[in-house]
Amino acid sequence: MAIDKEAIKKHIEGILVALGDDPNRPGLLETPQRVANMYEELFEGMNYTNHEIAEMFNKSFEEECASNGNNIVVVKDIEIFSHCEHHLALMYDMTVTVAYIPQGKVIGLSKIARIADMVGKRLQLQERIGSDIADIIAEVTGSPDVAVLIDASHSCMTARGICKPSAKTHTETLRGKFENDSNLWMMIR
């Protein structure tokens, strides 16, 4: 699915009119095009399925040390952002922790951050971001033992509605051994 920038431009013009402004005034003349360009970048992940993202970032290495089941890989504090599918509001100050137990191969560390970033570039729910990242990491590494922890602020809660600017949301997606072994789960927190 490709992002339709022409449709975005047309609808942004309509939104400007609906807000009571004139899309032809000098300060707004190029706004629809700028917003369309921005949306193409912000929502790039909407162009790909989880499987396609896994294929895109499938840079893994066969490792003997990864076969004994005694290793754990944890990447913490991956900063991403996303947009809430309910209000199109920004989810920000978002940090992701990804952990997995290698099953004979390891993924390039930068690929973990790239996967998290691409998953965030969709209209999302925080819970789904965790599930999508876990699914992709499991596909790339072949490991069923994956955990994804996410902390984020949601502007749909901090800047509108209830207006609680200090509120943070924490979600955990636990698969395989992380789901059943509280010691493993505590190690990554």
Image (spheres, helix red, strand yellow):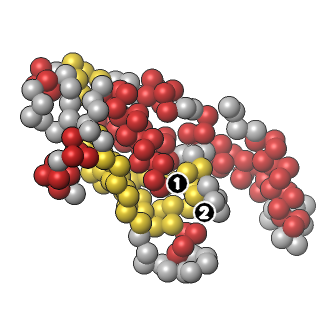
140, above or below 135, in the image: above
Which residue is disc 1 drawn over? Answer: 125
| Residue 94 at x, y percent in the picture | 41, 59
Which residue is disc 2 drawn over? Answer: 89
Picture quadrant where residue 101 is located: top left
| Residue 147 at x, y percent in the picture | 29, 45
Residue pictured at 41% horizontal, 70% vertical: 168
| Callout 2 crowding tier (Cα within 10 Å): few <14, some 14–19, many ≥20 | some
Residue pictured at 34% horizontal, 32% vertical: 138
Quarter the N terminus occupies: top right
Instruction: Confirm or deny contact between disc 2 and disc 1 (CB under 8 A).
Output: no
Q: Nearer the viewer, residue 132 or 174?
A: 174
Q: Nearer the viewer, residue 186 or 29?
A: 186
Q: Amino acid at mark 1?
A: Leu
Q: Nearer the viewer, mark 2 or mark 1?
A: 1
Pick whichever of labels 2 and 1 is earlier in the sequence.
2
Residue pictured at 48% horizontal, 62% vertical: 92
Q: Amino acid at mark 2?
A: Ala
Residue pictured at 30% horizontal, 25% vertical: 142
Please tell me whether mark 1 sits on a helix, a strand or a loop: loop
Q: Nearer the viewer, residue 83 or 68?
A: 68
- Using the numbered discs, state the Cα–Cα distance from disc 2 to disc 1 in whole angstroms: 11 Å
Quarter the C terminus occupies: bottom left
Picture quadrant where residue 4 is located: top right
26, above or below 70, in the image: below
Q: Is residue 19 left or right of residue 73?
A: right
